[in-house]
Image (spheres, helix red, strand yellow):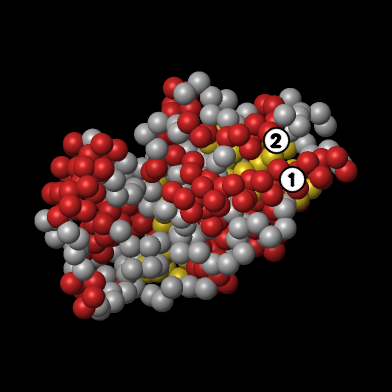
Amino acid sequence: MRIFLSCQQALQKHNVPAYSFWETYFKKGIEEAGHEWIEADGMDWAEGLVHSNVNDLHQWRDRTWNRTIDFIKEQHQKQPIDLFLSYLFPKQVEPSAVREIQALGIPCVNFFCDNVRELTQIPKSFFCFDLHWVPEFKALKLYEQANLNYIYAPMPVWIPPEQRTCEHSEKYCVSFIGSRDSQREVLLSQVLEAGVSVEIRGAGWIPRAKSLSSELHHQNIWQTSFNQWDFITTHGIVPWTRKILAKSQPRIPDLIFTKFVQPQPDAATYIEILQQSQITLGINRYPSFHYPFLQPNTYSRMRDIEAPMMGACYLTEWSEGIDSLYELGEEIETYHSAEEMIEKIRILEADPGKRNRMRYQGQRRALADHTVTKSIAKIHLTLGLNP
C-alpha cells in the first residue's frame, strides 16, 4: 500500500509533551510491513497542538490542510494513494478536508491514544474518518456509543532489530521512568516507605526552586471566575469539587524520593535501563478529577508494548484489557495496588529464572502480535482494501 502519513511531524521543537518518536515508530513500522509512506514536505503538524488562540488555530488548519490536499491530489494522479493515516487530536482535524480526500477514493484512518484521558465522548470532528485506530481497551465503548467504525490495535511501537534481544545482563535494579505527578507520588512513596528500592527517572522528580515571579502570579477575580465556570460546564460539578479540594491536599515531600531519584536518561540510556533492569515498572494510573483520588482510573500505556518488545522483565499496573495483550504471570506481571506491587517485586527479585522467562515470553508475544505490521494488516482487512 501507498500511505499518506500525518503523525505529528514537526519543523521545530514545540512546547508540548513528547511527540517526535511517533514519526519514527509510524514510518519504520510501515516500512517493515512492506508498505510505502509519503508526506508533504515542509508540514508542521505538531504546531496544531500549540495554538490556543482560535484565530491562530484556524489559520494553521487552513494553511496545513490546503497544502495537504494539493499534495495528495498531485501525488494521487501520478501514483494512487491507498490510505490516509493520521495521528490527529480533535482540534487539528478539518472535516471538510478529510471529506475532500475521501472523494478521491482514499479511505481515511485516524489513530488516537488519548481517548481515556482527554475524552468523555467522541468529538464531532472525528466523525469524518472511515476508521479509528483505538489502542485503549477502555475507550472502545466511546466509539461504540458514537456508532463509529474502529479497530482495537496496540500502540504503534517499532523497535530496531538490534534491540530485539532478551538475554540482558542486569545492570540496574527496579526502575521506573516517567514524569512526576500526584498519583505516581503517592504510589511510589508507599513502595519506598515499605523498604523497596526503586530507581526513579523522569521530569519533575528533582525539585527546582520556585521563581519569585511564579509565586507572585495571580489572576483577577473575573478571569478566575470565568475559568472556574468554564471548568464546571466542561467537566461537571463533582470534578470541580474534587479540583477545589485537591488544592488543600498536601503533596508528598521531596525528601522521600531524594535518594532514589537518578538523572533523566538520554535515548541510549533509556533503552539500556528498560532492558537491563532487574524489573522495569509501568504505572498506568493518572491524575483526573473525574475519579476519586484514592481510586484512580488506569489504562494501558505505550510502555506496555515497548518494554516487553525490548526484552524487559516487565511489571505494570493492571488495566482493563491488558489480559487480552499478554498472558499475565507468564509474559508480563501486573499489580492492582502498592501492596501487590511490593509483593510482585519481592517475588521477581528472588527468582532470576522467572525474570528470564518473562523477558523471553513477553518479547516473543509482543513481536508476534503487537507490531505495526499486524495493525496495518487489520486496517487493510477491515476496510477491504485491494492487495
- Outermost residue toward the right? 78
Residue 48 at x, y = what percent?
Answer: 52, 53
Viewer-closest of 101 and 243: 101
Characterize the local packing of mark 2: few (<14), some (14-19) or many (20 or more) Cα atoms within 10 angstroms: many
Could you tell me which residue is drawn at 69 percent across and 63 percent down?
Answer: 162
Q: Amino acid at mark 1?
A: Asp
Q: Residue at x 40, y 67 (%)?
A: 202
Q: Nearer the viewer, mark 1 or mark 2?
A: 1
Q: Decide: marks 1, 2 in contact (CB < 8 A)? A: no
Q: Which residue is mark 2?
A: 101
Q: Nearer the viewer, residue 343 or 98?
A: 98
**Residue 40: x and y, percent?**
72, 53
Q: Is residue 243 above or below residue 250?
A: above
Residue 387 visible in image: yes
Of helix, strand and loop, which one carries label 2? helix
Q: Which mark is residue 217?
A: none
The residue pinned by badge 1 equals: 70
